[in-house]
Image: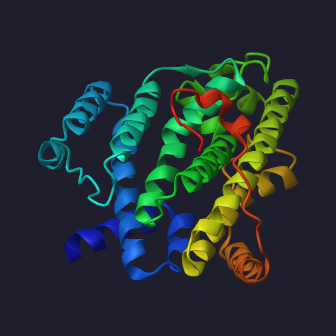
Amino acid sequence: MDCHVDDDKLVLKKNGKSFYWAGKLLPKETINRAAELYRFCRILDDIADNGKINSLKELSEIRSNIKKKTFADLEKNYSIKYPKFLNISSKKVVIDLIDGLILDQKSILFKKEEELIRYSYHVAGTVGIMMCDALKCNNDLAKSFAIDLGIAMQLTNIARDVLEDAKMGRRYLPGTWVQNISPKEIVLAAKTNDLKKIHTISKGIKKLLILAEKYYLSGEKGFNFLPFNTRIAISVASGVYREIGVQLENKNYNWQSGRQVTSIFTKIKITLFKIVKEIFYFRFLKKHNSELHIFLENLVNDK
């Protein structure tokens, strides 16, 4: 068991630097569950992104195993350890996550904001719900806010990786935002310094980060459901990831020069700020804004 825990933490440390940093503030048992969840999601993500011809087949088989609850086959065939702490109701959420990864197996060219939000729910809002299980927070209202935090982080992730995604034939920015520029055109614009198309994509990224901010603000309202130490850790994770968008904004949404990375100094500054904020700042618990889930009909139910 200890070996599994150590392996989980190593995967988190290597691939989820923002979350690993924030996880230092979590109680031992909680970070162990969070690391286990991260590794579970990471393996699924790696299968989706490994470029193999049979990725779709593997994801479909994993989906079937989870639906049938044949978890032993998951570990035997794919070295996937299904997190035991996940609630029974979370099985549907895991299926939703895999459905999003299956969608990634083909060229992505979203046309409208609706597709972007639904996709972000599938691959990240679902993780927010599962994190509630890891944090032992079973309040349905809290899960609505957790979905929003997951969506916000995914929108930030998309803003950071526009060029890398384009190289894989994916354009998550809605076509209505960026004049339907194709992934090939995005890559070419970066190579040839096509200022017109670069500006068009930059405007799309700006709009994306404004949208992300709406979901961050909603996600933060859910922190009240968490114990103090846990609340600080999640607040730090949110702040560190959000900083990627801040840095993009400060660099005039320069997406063509490579990924934004948050420095250790900035992480320390954000951590100290969040600790002070959570000590002195009181949030009035409000009803969740159901308009943020207007595109998630039949996927989630706001309480």
Q: Position of residue 73 (x, y in %)?
A: 13, 43
Residue at screen point 56% across, 80% down: 229
Residue at screen point 41% across, 59% down: 133
Residue at screen point 59% across, 30% down: 296
Residue 166 in view of the camera = no
Q: Position of residue 165 (x, y in %)?
A: 58, 34
Quarter of image, res 62: top left
In the image, 14: left or right of 236? left
Viewer-proximal residue among 293 and 73: 293
In the image, 296: left or right of 214? left
Quarter of image, res 60: top left
Quarter of the image where the N terminus is located = bottom left
Q: How many marks?
A: 0
Residue at screen point 73% across, 33% down: 190
Quarter of the image where the C terminus is located = top right
In the image, 224: left or right of 19? right
Q: Position of residue 182 (x, y in %)?
A: 67, 18
Quarter of image, res 175: top right
Viewer-proximal residue among 25 and 303: 303
Viewer-proximal residue among 236 and 78: 236
Q: Position of residue 70 (x, y in %)?
A: 15, 41
Establish if 152 lies above or below 30.
above
